[in-house]
C-alpha cells in the first residue's frame, strides 16, 4: 500500500483548518446577500476570504486562553507566566545567537516553568524538579509521548518502545526488560574486545603524529558493542578505520566508505533529520513536502539490519515447535524478541530503538568525560590512581571492581550532570491536570488536555539554587562529599540523566558499565590527554560561546543536539601513553 508523502498527508489531516475559514466567510456573505440584500463585490469576497484565516486563528487563540483560565480557576490552579514574543527572539549580537542562551535568559526572567508560543501553539517549558517528577512519576498516567511526537519520530523509530504509548509501550517494555539482567550487563567480553581494538587503532594514529576524534572512536566502539550485544554479530564499524583531522592532507585521501561506516553515518543523519522536525512542530510535513528526509536515510540502515532479522526469522521457522522459549545467557536481544513475537516490523522497530539508546547515551557520556578529563588533569590523575590501585595497569576490570571505584562513578555522574545524553524531552497531557506548587501559598499550575510539556534536564542540572553556587563547574567530588546530603539526597529528582518513573531507561546500568569499562581500559594505557579542537575548524567554538549564562566561562567544546547530545565537529584529542608501571 502506497504511503502519501509528508506534505500531502499533512494537508489531508488538516484540510478542515484550511477549508473552514473561507467556507464560513462565504456562508456569511451568502446570508447577508439573501436576507439583508447586501451585495459584496468579488474582490471583497477574495479579500475577506484571505483575512478570515488570521481572524479565526487569533480569535481561536484568544478563546483558548480564556477557556484555559476558566478551567484553571475551576481546578483551584493558575496558568504559568506566558513568554512575550519579543523575548523569544535571539539578540542581534552574534555571541547571543545560541539557543541555550535564550532558554537560560527566559528562566531568569519568567522562572523555571512558563508557557512559550511556537508557531501560534503554546507549549509548557519546565526545569522544575517537582514538575518533572509529576510528569514522569507521581502523575504518570496523565501524560504520554503524544501523537505529535509519535508522528515526528515514526520514520525512524516506528512503533518501538521510545515512540509508543499505552498498551503498545507496555508490550515493548515487557519484551525488553528481561534481557537487561545483572548477569548479562556485567558480561564484559564484548566490551573488552571492541575497546582493545579501538584503543590499539588510536595508539597507531597517535604514533603517526595525528590527533584522534575521540567522539568518532567511541561512537564506533559503542556501535560495534551494541550490535553484537543486540544481534549476536557486530557491524564492524571500527574496521572502517579512524578519520584523520580535517586539516590534514591524509583526510583528503579517505574517500571510500564501507557498509558499516555508511550505516553509522546514515544512522546519524536520520537522527538529525528527525530532530529538525521539532522546529516546525506538527507542520514539519510542509518542510518535507514530497520526500520523507528520514525515510531516505533508512536504506543503508536496513541494508545491514534486514538480512540479520530475516535470517533469524527463517531459523526460528525451521526450528518450529522445538524452539526453546526460555531466556538463556546465550540469548541476544534479537533472539529474546523472537521468543515473544514473529512480527517483523515490531522486532525491527524495537531493535532500532534499543540500538539508538545503546549506542548514543554511552558515546555521549564517554565523549564529554574525556573532554573534561583533558581540561582537568588533576581529576584525570586522581581517577587514574584509583584505577591502577584497584585493577593495576593491565588486568581486565570485573563488575565488582567497577562497583568499588567510587571516584570513577563520581566522574561519570558529574559528566552526566553537565552533559545529560538527552538534554530535552517531551510529553503530552492526556487530560486536564495540574502541576504541584513549588512554594508555600502558591496555587498549582493548570495543564490543559493536549498540552505538550517540554522539560530540560540540561538546564535543571545546571541550576545554582539546586546544586549550589558552583553548579556550573565540573567537580566530581559533589557526588562524594557533604553536597550529596545537602542537595541530592533531599531532592533526588534534580538528577535525571536517564529519566525516571515507569519509563526510566532500562539500559541505565548497561551504560554505566560500558562507560566505566572503557574509561578503565583507556587510563590503564594513557596518562595524559590534550584537547586540540584547532585541528578541526568545525569543532572550534564561535566568539562569545563560553559567555552563556549556563556556562562557567571555560567551555571549549561546542555542544550540539539531535536526539542526544554531541560535540559539534568531533572531540579531537592527543594522548600520552603510560609508561610501564
Image (tube, helix red, strand yellow):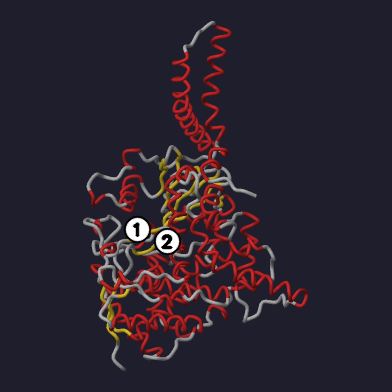
Q: Are marks 1 and 2 in contact (CB under 8 Å)?
A: yes
Q: Which mark is drawn over residue 463?
A: 1
The answer to whether residue 476 shows anywhere in this view is no
Numbered disc total: 2
Answer with left or right where residue 541 lies relative to residue 399. left
Crowdedness of circle 2 by 10 Å Cα count: few (<14), some, many (20+)? many
User: Which numbered disc flags the more N-terminal residue, 1 or 2?
Assistant: 1
Answer with left or right where residue 337 lies relative to residue 249. right
Which residue carries the number 2 mark? 494
Which of the 4 quarters of the picture holds residue 318? bottom right
The vertical placement of 516 against 561, above or below, is below
- Describe the element under mark 2 as helix, strand or loop: helix
Crowdedness of circle 1 by 10 Å Cα count: few (<14), some, many (20+)? many
The vertical placement of 35 against 344, above or below, is above
* Closest to the observer, 11 or 118: 11
Q: Which mark is drawn over residue 357?
A: none
Residue depicted at x 41% and y 89%: 391
Q: Quadrant of the C terminus?
A: bottom left
Amino acid at each position: 500500500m502506497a504511503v502519501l508523502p509528508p506534505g500531502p498527508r499533512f494537508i489531508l489531516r488538516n484540510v478542515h483548518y484550511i477549508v473552514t475559514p473561507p467556507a464560513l466567510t462565504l456562508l456569511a456573505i451568502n446570508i447577508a446577500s439573501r436576507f439583508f440584500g447586501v451585495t459584496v463585490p468579488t474582490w471583497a469576497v477574495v479579500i475577506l476570504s484571505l483575512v478570515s484565516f488570521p481572524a479565526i486563528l487569533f480569535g481561536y487563540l484568544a478563546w483558548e486562553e480564556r477557556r484555559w483560565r476558566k478551567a484553571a480557576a475551576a481546578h483551584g490552579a493558575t496558568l504559568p507566566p506566558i513568554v512575550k514574543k519579543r523575548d523569544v527572539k535571539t539578540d542581534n549580537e552574534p555571541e547571543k545567537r545560541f539557543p541555550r542562551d535564550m532558554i537560560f535568559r527566559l528562566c531568569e526572567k519568567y522562572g523555571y516553568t512558563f508557557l512559550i508560543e511556537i508557531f501560534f501553539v503554546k507549549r509548557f517549558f519546565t526545569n522544575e524538579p517537582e514538575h518533572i517528577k509529576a510528569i514522569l512519576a507521581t502523575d504518570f498516567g496523565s501524560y504520554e509521548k503524544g501523537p505529535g511526537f509519535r508522528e515526528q519520530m515514526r520514520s525512524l523509530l516506528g512503533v518501538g518502545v521510545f515512540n509508543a504509548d499505552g498498551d503498545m509501550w507496555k508490550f515493548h517494555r515487557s519484551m525488553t526488560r528481561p534481557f537487561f539482567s545483572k548477569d548479562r550487563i556485567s558480561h564484559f567480553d564484548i566490551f573488552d574486545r571492541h575497546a582493545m581494538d579501538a584503543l590499539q587503532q588510536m595508539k597507531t594514529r597517535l604514533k603517526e603524529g595525528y590527533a584522534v576524534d575521540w567522539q568518532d572512536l567511541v561512537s564506533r566502539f559503542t556501535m560495534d558493542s551494541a550490535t553484537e550485544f543486540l544481534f549476536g554479530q557486530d557491524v564492524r564499524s571500527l574496521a572502517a578505520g579512524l578519520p584523520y583531522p580535517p586539516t590534514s592532507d591524509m583526510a583528503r585521501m579517505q574517500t571510500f566508505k564501507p557498509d558499516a561506516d555508511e550505516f553509522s553515518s546514515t544512522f546519524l543523519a536520520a537522527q538529525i533529520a528527525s530532530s529538525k522536525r521539532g522546529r516546525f512542530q506538527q507542520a514539519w510535513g510542509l518542510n518535507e513536502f514530497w520526500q520523507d528526509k528520514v525515510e531516505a536515510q533508512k536504506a543503508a540502515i536496513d541494508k545491514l539490519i534486514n538480512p540479520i532479522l530475516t535470517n533469524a526469522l527463517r531459523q526460528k521457522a525451521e526450528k518450529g515447535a522445538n524452539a526453546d522459549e526460555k531466556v538463556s545467557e546465550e540469548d541476544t536481544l534479537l533472539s529474546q524478541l523472537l521468543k515473544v513475537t514473529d512480527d517483523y516490523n515490531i522486532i525491527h522497530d524495537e531493535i532500532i530503538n534499543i540500538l539508538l539508546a545503546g549506542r548514543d547515551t554511552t558515546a555521549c557520556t564517554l565523549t564529554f568525560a574525556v573532554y573534561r578529563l583533558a581540561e582537568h588533569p588533576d581529576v584525570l590523575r586522581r581517577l587514574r590512581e584509583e584505577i591502577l590501585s584497584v585493577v593495576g595497569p593491565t588486568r581486565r576490570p570485573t563488575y565488582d571492581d567497577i562497583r568499588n571505584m567510587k571516584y570513577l562513578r563520581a566522574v561519570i555522574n558529574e559528566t552526566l550532570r553537565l552533559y545529560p545524553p538527552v538534554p530535552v524531552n517531551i510529553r503530552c497531557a492526556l487530560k486536564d491536570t495540574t502541576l504541584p506548587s513549588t512554594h508555600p501559598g502558591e496555587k498549582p499550575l493548570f495543564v490543559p488536555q493536549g498540552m505538550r510539556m517540554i522539560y530540560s534536564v540540561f538546564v535543571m542540572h545546571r541550576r545554582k539554587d539546586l546544586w549550589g553556587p558552583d553548579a556550573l563547574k565540573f567537580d566530581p567530588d559533589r557526588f562524594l562529599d557533604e553536597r550529596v546530603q545537602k542537595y541530592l539526597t533531599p531532592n533526588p529528582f534534580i538528577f535525571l540523566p536517564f529519566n525516571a518513573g515507569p519509563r526510566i531507561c532500562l539500559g541505565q546500568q548497561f551504560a554505566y558499565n560500558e562507560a566505566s569499562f572503557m574509561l578503565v581500559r583507556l587510563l590503564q594505557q594513557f596518562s595524559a590527554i590534550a584537547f586540540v579542537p584547532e585541528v578541526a575548524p568545525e569543532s572550534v567554538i564561535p566568539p562569545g560561546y563560553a559567555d552563556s549564562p549556563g556556562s562557567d566561562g571555560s567551555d571549549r567544546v561546542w555542544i550540539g543536539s539531535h536526539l542526544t547530545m554531541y560535540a559539534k565537529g568531533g572531540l579531537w584529542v592527543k594522548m600520552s601513553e603510560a609508561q610501564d608501571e
